[in-house]
Image (cartoon, rainbow, N blue to C red):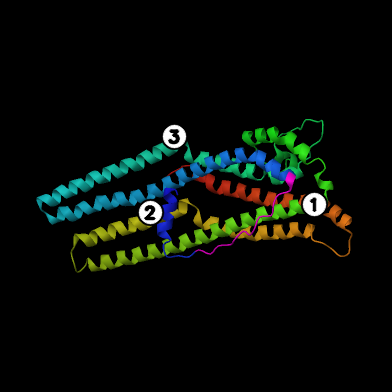
Amino acid sequence: MALYQHIQRVLLIGMRLPSTPPGVQPPAPPALAQLAQAIAPAHQRFDAHAVHAGNRYRSAFWAIYLLSALAIFCAVVPLVFILGGGAEDHLMAVAWGVAELLIIGVVGLLVAAGNRSDWHGRWLEARTRAEMAWYLPMIAPLVPFEAGTAPVDENWYARAFGSEGPALAAREIAALCGEVSPLASRLLREAWADPQFVSAYAAWAAGILRGQRAYHDAVRARQRALIARVGRINATLFAATALGAAAHLFVHSPWLLFLTIFFPALGASLHGALAQSEAYRLALSSDRLAGELESAIARIEACVRPSSHSSELAQSEAAAAELPEAIGAAIGLVLDEHHAWHALVRPHHLPLG
């Protein structure tokens, strides 16, 4: 578990987060199962890189905000000892001052390392590659694999959706598509003529989308819980600061001075970390996407729903005609949301500040 996840877990102590189980994932059609197995090593590599990069970046900015508050803590505590007046108190003040300088040094190193290595940019690029690789087996049946002709573009996103579609260009994805295209072409050559493939593909795609819906439900719940908890903490810190300032009019204690300086700094640090993580907008976008995914799932399932008014062959032919558009629209929805997330997070490219 990354540092930022430990911090959030502490902040959410005592809160029960609702969860939406994704349900049982139906098996993929044999052709797509083989294709997914061929793509899996590359996707696992991309995903591991994305998780590592994301954990490093998000842990860094949470650490920077909270260490900044801790530096103010170390800066204010010496006032208490200095006002105490004893020789030992002055030595303690020097020790706290040294601790403050060390914390500021750590913050500076984090900012410099993040900017030099572009933790923010690498996270965005790695997450894009992982998302695109994840959906390749689902997109494969939508790609026109013409036997004996070289594709204009190896990227399946460009070939399936065209120039107006959500084609996220990436060299690694295009290379991966080129590697597995011969296998995909062989496995899927007659797939749409097989009624079992059509029904299994629809059920498998709906299952993947249910998993995405459950993920976005979890993101929405977690972000809303963080917003609520940090809001309560800040309200408490504000009230304590106000009480301390009022008490200072009657009781002249250096500890009251400490309280009225450190508590606002801690509240500002928590609010800054939450704003940097875009918690509010992530909660809104995940809420919206969960609803849209539910509609997309219903549309996919409607394509293969049995009808008493049509023969099995006619139903299969109708599903083969309608299902590609329904699944393409669902994938486009997810990728458009990824574009929106990318646009949301990209402006933070004063990366760790």
Callout 3: few (<14), some (14-19), or many (20+) C-alpha neighbours within 10 Å? few
Report the residue marked by disc 2. 269
Badge 2 or badge 3: first in the primary sequence: 3
Calculate the distance from the C-alpha at mark 1 to the C-alpha at mark 2.
56 Å
Q: On the rendered structure, is 189 left or right of 253?
A: right
- Residue 336 visible, this angle: yes
Residue type at mark 2 is Ser
- The answer to whether residue 185 is magenta is no
**Residue 26 part of the magenta-drawn span:** yes
Under circle 3, the secondary element is: helix
Residue most extreme to the left: 87
Q: Amino acid at mark 1?
A: Gln
Where does label 1 land, which residue? 196
Marks 1 and 3, the one that precedes in the sequence: 3
Q: Check disc 3 and report the residue beneath it.
A: 116
- Give whichever of discs 1 and 2 has the lower sequence position: 1
- Helix, strand or loop for disc 2: helix
What residue span does the magenta drawing correspond to? Answer: 17-30
Q: Quadrant of the C terminus?
A: top left
* 153 and 7: which is toward the camera: 7
| Closer to the camera in the image, 247 or 116 | 116
